[in-house]
Image (cartoon, rainbow, N blue to C red):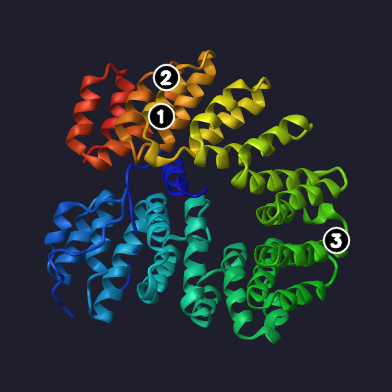
Amino acid sequence: MQQHRFKWILLAVLAGVAVAGFLLWPDGEEKVPASGSQQVPGVKSQEFAAGVDDAVALESAIKAASPAEYPGLLDAVLELKNPATKRRVLQLLMSDWTRREPEGLLVDLDARELISGSFGKDWMEMAPALAEGVRQTGTAESSSESLHELLLFAAERYADVDPQAAKDWANQYLTGEPRDAAMASIVAELAVASPESANTLLDELHSEDGRRDAARSIAARLSERNPERGLAWAEALPQGPERLAALNGSLEVMSDAEPRLAVERFQSLGKPEDFAEVSRRLAENLALEDSAEGVRWAESLPPGMARDEALAGALRGWAISDPQRAFEYFQAHSLDAAAVAGVFEEWAAVESGDAAAAATRLSDAKTRAIAVESVISAWPLDHGMQELDEWIDQMPNPAEKDQAAAIMANTFALDYPEAAWKRALKIQNADLRQQALYAAFSGLVIENPQQARSFMEKANLPEVDRAQLSELLP
């Protein structure tokens, strides 16, 4: 289930960010259409950006803009036709955005890719601009998780459009672990173009984590072209963490294309525990083709993490076609509580009311909490909020009701901000209420800042909460 993926990424950074966006590079004026830029739902352009009609004005606007205005400016910059001009203005926007609000930039990039699939030809200019913007911010010294994520994002997209240039960039500007982290995806693209150089490319990385990540990436990319060739490359590596990472990467790709072949290879490679991370995906793919076969294979594994993961995957795959039967299997067996998450996510996607009722009837508190969260996170957008709201109201345990309300407010802050706001106001736990109000109010600001202000003024909020929310208003 990916319908709420962007929202969870956005709301994960809302503790310090309102709305945000993206890029920087440095030539020739040209006109920008007054309208026609594509909007990204949840990342709305500021109105003034549509009126910016030349590159010089865009540069001035970028220098004077707040981070909340960057998404609209990016829409305008992407309309520029002159490549040199676009590179220069993109570089300016990217560097400012990375320096001032890397969390928001990451949100905007992910949102745009989730909605459009990719930036297509724009990445030819955007990837090096983003890479340079991240580099200028000081990734080698920074401990910011957002900057690290941006570094990997930039390296992957740069490698997609020009892997050799991306490699040269990483070698010139990055050192130590940041360099190896970036190189992991870069060398994988180079290995696809020249498989015989894969081992040499791997030897260019020095940190243990970097070599392990690169081995996995290379094996996965080779397997996308030819599963057997990718697996053979992984098997030929010396015994150790890099070989295990490569085997897992190859098996994961193989399981998507040919799950039965992947099962054969899985069983011939060694201890199942070495491949616990891929066993869930493999069992899910098997169960998608034949639920009974997926469950049988998972049950055949020896007790341990690989078996637990495989059973969770098999139940998710089974739940896509028959969630009720998958749930009954879960109830009849002593499975880890985490295995119920996939069942309820898939169940809620097709029969939300039945899934909700079953979740609240579970007797074990831990299992019930996981099931309730799974139902809310997978609740279909076209079902609206009324039924979900009524279900939460009927929960008898006050603490569990607060937790469910907070999950609901976070999950639907962008799609149904008013409903999320009203639900957040009902939360009794102060910490949960504050976080949920912040998320919901962010969605209200994105949709209509004036209405958001009105909602805040009418609510009976502590002064500390009011002050925090006011910071989100333009």
Which amino acid, by three-letter code, is at mark 1?
A: Ala
Whether residue 26 is visible:
no
Look at the picture and state if 220 lies above or below 472.
Answer: below
Mark closest to the chain's N terminus, 1 or 3: 3
Look at the picture and state if 384 lies above or below 115.
Answer: above
- From the image, tell me which residue sits under label 2: 427
Give the structural element (helix, strand or loop) at label 1. helix
Which of the 4 image quadrants contains residue 132? Answer: bottom left
Front residue of this view, candidates 344 and 322:
322
Which amino acid, by three-letter code, is at mark 2?
A: Ile
Which of the 4 image quadrants contains residue 305? Answer: top right
Q: Could you say where residue 270 lies in the image, as x and y percent from the top left?
A: 88, 61
- From the image, tell me which residue sits under label 3: 267
Q: Could you say where residue 199 lies in the image, as x and y percent from the top left?
A: 73, 79
Mark carried by residue 376: none
Label 2 with label 1: CB-CB less than 8 Å: yes
Query: Dot 1, how many residues are within 10 Å of its Cα: few (below 14), some (14-19), or many (20+)?
Result: many
Give the structural element (helix, strand or loop) at label 2. loop
Q: Could you say where residue 310 lies in the image, as x and y percent from the top left?
A: 75, 48
